[in-house]
Amino acid sequence: MQLTLRVWRQPSPQVKGKMANYHLTDVSEDMSFLEMLDVLNEQLILDGEDPIAFDHDCREGICGSCGLMINGIAHGPEQTTTCQLHMRSFSDGDTIDIEPWRSGGFPVVKDLVVDRSAFDRIISAGGFISAPTGTAPDAHATPVPKVDADAAFDAATCIGCGACVAACPNGSAMLFTAAKVTHLGLLPQGQPERDSRVVKMVAQQDAEDFGGCTNIGECSAVCPKGISMETISRLNHDLLGALRANAVPAS
Amino acid sequence: MGLTCASSYRVLVATVTTQQAGQSAGANPGPKRDPKTGRFGSSVFKKAVMAVTGIIFVLYLIAHMVGNLKAFAGAETFNAYSEFLRDLGEPIVPRLTVLTIIRVVLLVAVAAHIWAAFSLWKQAKRARPVAYVTKKRVQQSYASRTMRWGGVILILFIIWHILDLTLGAVNPAGRDSLPYGRLVEGFQNPVVTIWYAIALIALGFHIRHGVWSATQTLGHSNKRRERALNLFATVFAVVLVGGYLLIPFSVLFGIID
Amino acid sequence: MALELFLEGDPIADTKAPTDVPIGERWSERKFRGKLVNPANRRKMTIIVVGTGLAGGAAAATLAEAGYKVKSFWFQDSPRRAHSIAAQGGINAAKNYRNDGDSVHRLFYDTVKGGDFRSREDNVHRLAEISTQIIDQCVAQGVPFAREYGGLLDNRSFGGAQVSRTFYARGQTGQQLLIGAYQAFERQVAAGNIETHSRTEMLDLVVVDGKARGIVVRDLVTGEVTTHVADVVVLGTGGYSNVYYLSTNAKGSNTTAIWRAHKRGAYFANPCYTQIHPTCIPVSGDYQSKLTLMSESLRNDGRVWVPKERGDSRPPQDIPEDERDYYLERKYPAFGNLVPRDIASRQAKNVCDEGRGVGPGGLGVYLDFAEAIQRLGRKAVEAKYGNLFDMYARITGEDPYSAPMRIYPAVHYTMGGLWVDYDLQSTIPGLFVIGEANFSDHGANRLGASALMQGLSDGYFVLPNTITDYLSAGPFEKVPADHPAIVEAEAGVKAQVEKFLSINGTRTVASFHRELGRLVWDYCGMERTAEGLRKALDRIPELRKEFWTNVKVAGDAHTFNQNLEHAARVADFIELAELMCIDALHREESCGGHFRAESQTPEGEALRNDEEFAYVAAWGWTPEGEPPVLHREALEYEYVHLAQRSYK
């Protein structure tokens, strides 16, 4: 098939970006979206052009590295990761717009690559259970009801790709933050730090130039792992509870 | 497995199109500002303020609508009800005390609602310094998308509404008229009725998303309830707006005169 | 053995395991005999950890908790992206929660046997001992393992094991374990104990007075080349399956860190031991960039077949039953479609080599569920394998419910790696190697659900205990920034970057990588012959020469340049490939993942030669053009008796 790509090109954070057009022929519908970009890049290199930078690694939908805004939808027309999107989802002659995630919290590094270290800092703020190596009791010491374990797992499937932020009209990272708060807050091991965790994580998400959540639901609709809006409700519930308990952290 | 890049792929680098302001922020690590660990700084706290004040408005709106419907019982009943509101609480407390408390609560709630809304709006603007060239909607409802501008319409409407029907300042019946007279004279003007209807429809959308959003913000939504909640929000918004719109159109079509 | 292939070096041996006590006591004895570091001194010592996967992430977190200053480096944008995240199946532990006769000794025994008697008993026993602590640790961190209705952990049998000792979190065990380690890591970042270096790639090791004292790195965003010094360097940089270009590894997985350490003096052990996974989605075209693994559990109900006639291009549904060859059921009536990974893989290759393969390029065999769907009903099949079927449909665009799947083997793990002793220290003092990057525990073949176990064992429990013995002599003398070793290493890295950008040839880096991958796959893949390996050894130096004279690398050295990153990795893969082929050629026996066609039983099974090859081949680097030096570590089996595998 033949395609026209309109791709965001931005050489560095300091330089203004713009959309550039590329025409690609002989695209196989069995190619993955990233393989299509690989082919384009190899040709660009041979033509002496700068290839398009984009993040990717595992290419099996689990590492969370890839993430492109494709025709205005995070990860494109299927609810999956960009690497799992195949060209058969497009038709011959299509024009495809490709942009990076856009958020104050995700500054562009180059072209379609953004800096998502804000997510690491949100986790660093409290997205953990303090269990230093070697201190653990036997794994069966605390049974966990299956429903809780399953719900915690559903939230824990978040791959940290940032599609939620990209899709949110407010540029909010609340679904990401909520997935972690829910995962740890549902487990008995996560209870001691439950209050301080949610307060610190939400404070960090706000400090990173992400927006606030207004419950629109775009995030969950594009999440490749289908993380539910319920996690945000849980986060809200926990945060308000923590504020009532006056759990403002010491640090 | 091919050994070389298939040369049949043709790439033509052509034009450059859209102009967008580039981001100037460097890829430097570290947050933009210190985390706000205070109670009032959190975006979720602001959302809770919106939810709680929103609930106050909804309760008030229900009572207000019930009161409005007394217009169908005639001028006397309606005006008497209006007086009753002023007498409410008497003789335990002096006349107008309860009404004043209600008015103060509403005023504070409006101020808090607007403060939280603007604060979150500002945060959202900061969160997307460069707009998308192409952005599609996947899930969002019309109601959720129009909360902010809908809110602006509503505040303008409320100001006009108070000037019109509470104070009578902009009402054709004048300042010294009785409530029923202001109501009838006002809505006999189709322009007024249409403006009122537009604002009420905006209110409907605002409530449609607001009810769902408040439940979610206060942490009482979950996967099982999601559908039911959204359905309830829609039905509630329709009933409420319908209840309000009965009056002006009844006036316009002469059912109430 | 031809002399020009390699030089015989001195034998090598582990001296750290206390072999004077019984095997079950050696680990605690080693911890007792090793010297400790006073908590006040830990603050004065810096540890570099490269890589943030299960091994590197767990080690960095644990060492930081202990009070050391840790500097962590990774090439992805976040430590959570390391390729450990893609592991699906599970993690073994000798908990015996099922009361089915499992024990530390049984896990030890199974692992040594599964590794085809090419691993070190002491290390494997320690791994089995630690396995139980790993599960405790992960549960305490909040890893959401699968649970039963009673709230206790669920277990399953995996990879043909007779006991249920595998803990799992649906099909995403690696992800959940890695996120556990990542969270512990981020906790230490917040505490100020870990200094992070994101999108930073290690390009050389700094060795001062015979000790590893730092690394030279390139900031992938700015292109800046800098040196970081420390008291000790730890590499947890994963395996090198991407030497094959197409593998199940992440695109970024590479050998560069361990290969450059190897060039600084660390021996590389058993490079030819690679593992092939039989049930991957086959290649669909030239543009293919990676292969996707599907769980082996598919073989429980799927039947593997190819047409009896070569070149039969009819759609599978049109091929009548009597014209199909269910070759695994035919050749291995006892195990049928459930033969071990290496056998299933090799047989698939054989039928494709005969011209009976199916799909694009004839590189695939059918995995047919028609019989299972008829027997169990579509609903039951969907419940069991629904997510795998969906994944297959998404990637291939074919419906596996109506037509058989096509599968083909793919490389997915490398047992070889830098040689380490019982303390996980390489032949360079002060350089420790953990996880898939070392060679330590799996011998010639890794059992299913053991990679995660080893990574976490090394990272959480082994290294933090063994590294103290080395550090007890520290803190070591400061290395000034203008030390000749640093100046030389930095200059070398910069020169290489400049060289890449100056060649300006006519072939892309990817095209070299593809050609190399095809070469290694064909001659040092599932089945190796002396003839094929010699062919590869003729071609690789030519390819290397062409690479260094005709590669075209785009962009410049001072901006984010993914093409430049790839060039450096491919340069190292080419060198590694040569050593892999030499190792494979010199090992004239078949064992585990290394199958030499010349060494097989009359039934076509791998035939070991314990008399001559019961050793670890640890290779010393020599400059280009000189044969590498072989150091042998003899393997002795005190507790597990040598036996031939049989699956007839």
Image: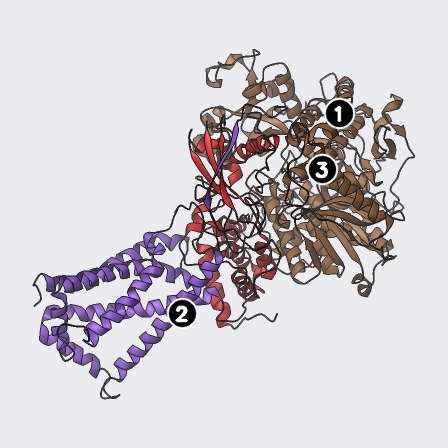
Chain colours: A red, B purple, C brown
Q: Are marks 2 and 1 in contact (CB under 8 Å)?
A: no
Confirm whether circles 2 and 1 share one chain.
Answer: no
Q: CA distance from mark 2 to mark 1?
A: 69 Å
Characterize the local packing of mark 3: few (<14), some (14-19) or many (20 or more) Cα atoms within 10 angstroms: some
* Label 2 secondary element: helix
Q: Are marks 3 and 2 in contact (CB under 8 Å)?
A: no
- Answer whether residue C446 is visible to the viewer in this image: no
* Label 1 secondary element: helix
Q: Position of residue C292 (x, y in %)?
A: 58, 33
Characterize the local packing of mark 1: few (<14), some (14-19) or many (20 or more) Cα atoms within 10 angstroms: many
Residue type highlighted by circle 2 = Trp
User: What residue is pinned by disc 2?
Assistant: B115
Up/down of A110 relative to B63, above or below: above
* Label 3 secondary element: helix
Residue type highlighted by circle 1 = Ile
Chain ID for label 1? C
Tell me if C479 is positioned left or right of C571 in this view: right
Characterize the local packing of mark 2: few (<14), some (14-19) or many (20 or more) Cα atoms within 10 angstroms: some
Q: What residue is drawn where x is 54% and y is 60%?
A: A208
Q: What residue is drawn where x is 57% and y is 58%?
A: A122
Q: CA distance from mark 3 to mark 1?
A: 16 Å
User: What residue is pinned by disc 3?
Assistant: C568
Residue type highlighted by circle 3 = Ala
Confirm whether circles 3 and 2 share one chain.
Answer: no
User: What residue is pinned by disc 1?
Assistant: C540
Q: Position of residue B180 (x, y in %)?
A: 12, 73
- Answer whether residue A226 is visible to the viewer in this image: yes
